[in-house]
Image (cartoon, grey):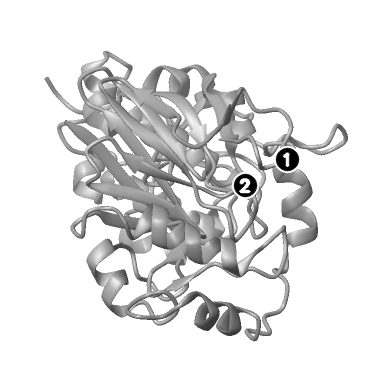
Amino acid sequence: MLIFRQLFDTQSSTYTYLLGDARSGAAILIDPVFEQAPRDAALLRELGLKLATTLETHVHADHVTGAWLMKHKTGSAIALSAESGAQGADRYLAHGDRLPFGGRSLEVRATPGHTHGCVTFVADDESMAFTGDCLLIRGCGRTDFQQGDPRAMYRSVKSQILSLPPSCLLYPAHDYRGLTVTSVAEERAFNPRLGGEIGEMDFVGYMQNLGLPHPKLMDIAVPANLRCGQPEQDAAMPAEPAWAPLTFTFAGIWEIAPDALEERAAGLQIVDVRELGEFDGPLGRIRGARSVPLAELAGRSGELAPDRPIVAVCRSGARSAQAVVMLQKAGFRDVANLAGGMLRWRAEGHRIEGGRE
């Protein structure tokens, strides 16, 4: 079975795609974003997948790739087009190459036009393809920088993408209107730049008169992506919490395990957001915990010290996850959720006050 997830970065409107082979656990990640590496690593961990390779459809101009950072976190290889001009990849791809992950694979198709090194990745059963910025949903990538060539793009789309089976689903690298997927049949019929009977000269004339401004991050993103996203030597790595061993979840919450909390409890603020009856109820409570029911948390956050880390606690970890979000919005930086709540705390035999067997 194929595991498939479409992920989104709101800052750059970039789609990142995770594909995994359920049987072997091997996975690939297409067009990762640097700032989203914690999210992507959390999803891999939660799904039980091992990242084999990160892939790039092209050298992006609107965001820095997360390829190097994912390699740093997971040991994954970096692969992108040999025509990209990038340095630091583990594998350079050519038209016709195959990229295996477990029992599945992707075919590499060269689709220059947006950039000289653009590629499209096609699933082994031709059920889906990842088109980068070559073909967008009812549109296409621009062709006015990074060796862009409207003639090359027209031929790429027609020969390598719209030649796929009509039912093949197409997933772009970006969308700015909230659209998520299209198909070969749809784009053949409805793409206003490349569909129907539109000829090469029609397309070239259209693209040469778009008059678009350059991407805002182009001067930062392109040089970084030519290094596969590796920061410059004097650049700081993304900071992770140092006050406790925490795990970042795909839901976007930092969590602390019960044993780690017990070891560090003396230096933390433990906020129990259950109702008072639960706080004094049969599950008991963690020694030193402060009772602040979730409904009162926003109004009572001023009672908490801003310079000491906070761990939110509830019965199962659900309400306390919402408490973490609320406290972060209130300006608290070092906040984590107790993974599994009091149920896990008791099950693992940690000390409680009150409660009963």
Drawn side of residue 311 relative to residue 266, left or right? left
Q: Relative to residue 12, is residue 65 depicted above or below?
A: above
**Dot 1 amino acid type:** Gly
Q: Relative to residue 77, is residue 6 depicted above or below?
A: below
Residue drawn at the location 54% of the way across and 63% of the way down: 153
Whether residues under marks 2 and 1 lie with C-beta atoms below 8 angstroms apart, the answer is: yes
Structural distance between the alpha carbons of marks 2 and 1: 8 Å
Residue 347 visible to an observer of this rendering: yes
Residue drawn at the location 14% of the way across and 24% of the way down: 356
Q: Could you tell me which secondary element the residue under label 2 belongs to? A: loop
Dot 1: within a 10 Å radius of its alpha carbon, few (fewer than 14), some, or many (20 or more) residues? some
* Label disc, if present, on residue 117 of the rendered structure: 2
Quarter assignment of residue 344? top left
Q: Earlier in the sequence, mark 2 or mark 1?
A: 1
Q: Relative to residue 322, is residue 202 depicted above or below?
A: below
Quadrant in which the C terminus appears? top left
Residue drawn at the location 27% of the way across and 45% of the way down: 318
Residue drawn at the location 40% of the way across and 24% of the way down: 257
Dot 2: within a 10 Å radius of its alpha carbon, few (fewer than 14), some, or many (20 or more) residues? many
Q: Position of residue 18 (x, y in %)?
A: 37, 40
Residue 12 visible to an observer of this rendering: no
Q: Could you tell me which secondary element the residue under label 1 belongs to? A: loop
**Dot 2 amino acid type:** Gly
Judged from this view, the residue extending furthest toward the right is 234
Total number of numbered labels? 2
Q: Nearer the viewer, residue 278 or 129?
A: 129
Quadrant in which the N terminus appears? top left
Q: Nearer the viewer, residue 115 or 316?
A: 115
Q: Which residue, given by chain and number where applicable, does mark 1 sit on?
A: 85
Q: Position of residue 329 (x, y in %)?
A: 52, 61
* Label disc, if present, on residue 159 of the rendered structure: none
